[in-house]
């Protein structure tokens, strides 16, 4: 700490002996040693407090990161186990499929409800009207004569 050579220490000792006197010199040396010991303890205690504050600051930062990670994991688990979403995503399409399977084949397929847009409709182009398939068209009324499709007639033969 202080760069003192032996010759400098000896000079300080001789001056202290002359100023303090040989009778009071051992008590003065003891007092200086106690004061140096007290200063070292205070410096060590101060260093300990500073180290503890640094550790707490780092622990607070780590604790904050852990809490953030924990909340992210809890949100993901909640999203994954949300029963309403699972029902909507799995059970509702199955009910629609069962309803379609129970419907007679000669009934037309009802149009599917349009999904609600999550963005403004102005950004989307207008939807084309649904195209009905001829095979799924409603049957003709019972009062009209039913035409049967023509039978296959090979080429070169006449139809009679």
Image (tube, rainbow, N blue to C red):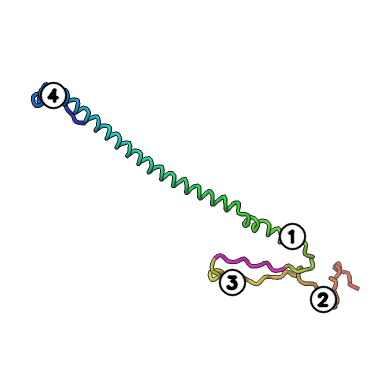
Q: CA distance from mark 2 to mark 1?
A: 28 Å
Looking at the image, tell me whether mark 2 or mark 1 is earlier in sequence order.
1
> Which element type, helix, strand or loop, lies under badge 2?
loop
Q: Nearer the viewer, residue 104 or 73?
A: 73
Q: Nearer the viewer, residue 98 or 160?
A: 98
Disc on res. 24: 4
Mark 2: few, some, or many residues within 10 Å (few <14, many ≥20)?
Answer: few
> Which element type, helix, strand or loop, lies under badge 3?
loop
Looking at the image, tell me whether mark 1 or mark 4 is earlier in sequence order.
4
Compared with 143, 83 (above or below) is above
Compared with 142, 92 (above or below) is above
Q: Which residue is painted at 68% across and 59% down in the image?
A: 93
Disc on res. 126: 3
- Residue 94 drawn at (x, y percent): 70, 58
Q: CA distance from mark 3 to mark 2?
A: 35 Å
Looking at the image, tell me whether mark 3 or mark 2 is earlier in sequence order.
3
Q: Circle 2 is placed at which residue position?
A: 141
Q: CA distance from mark 4 to mark 3?
A: 107 Å
Mark 2 or 1: in front is 1
Kindly report the secondary structure that dominates the magenta region of the rendered protein: loop
Which quadrant of the structure image shows residue 158? bottom right
Which quadrant of the structure image shows residue 139? bottom right
Q: Which residues are magenta?
A: 110-118
Q: CA distance from mark 4 to mark 2?
A: 133 Å
């Amino acid at each position: 700490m202080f760069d003192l050579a032996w010759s400098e220490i000896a000079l300080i000792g001789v001056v202290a002996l002359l100023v303090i006197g040989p009778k009071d010199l051992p008590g003065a040396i003891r007092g200086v040693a106690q004061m140096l010991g007290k200063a070292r303890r205070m410096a060590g205690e101060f260093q300990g407090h500073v180290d503890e504050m640094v550790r707490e600051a780092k622990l607070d930062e780590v604790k904050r990161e852990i809490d953030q990670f924990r909340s992210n994991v809890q949100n993901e688990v909640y999203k994954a186990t949300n029963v309403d979403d699972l029902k909507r995503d799995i059970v509702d399409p199955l009910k629609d499929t069962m309803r379609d399977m129970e419907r007679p084949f000669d009934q037309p397929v009802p149009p599917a409800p349009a999904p609600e847009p999550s963005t403004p409709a102005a950004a989307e182009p207008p939807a084309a009207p649904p195209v009905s398939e001829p095979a799924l068209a409603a049957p003709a009324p019972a009062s009209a004569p039913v035409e049967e499709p023509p039978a296959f007639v090979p080429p070169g033969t006449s139809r009679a």
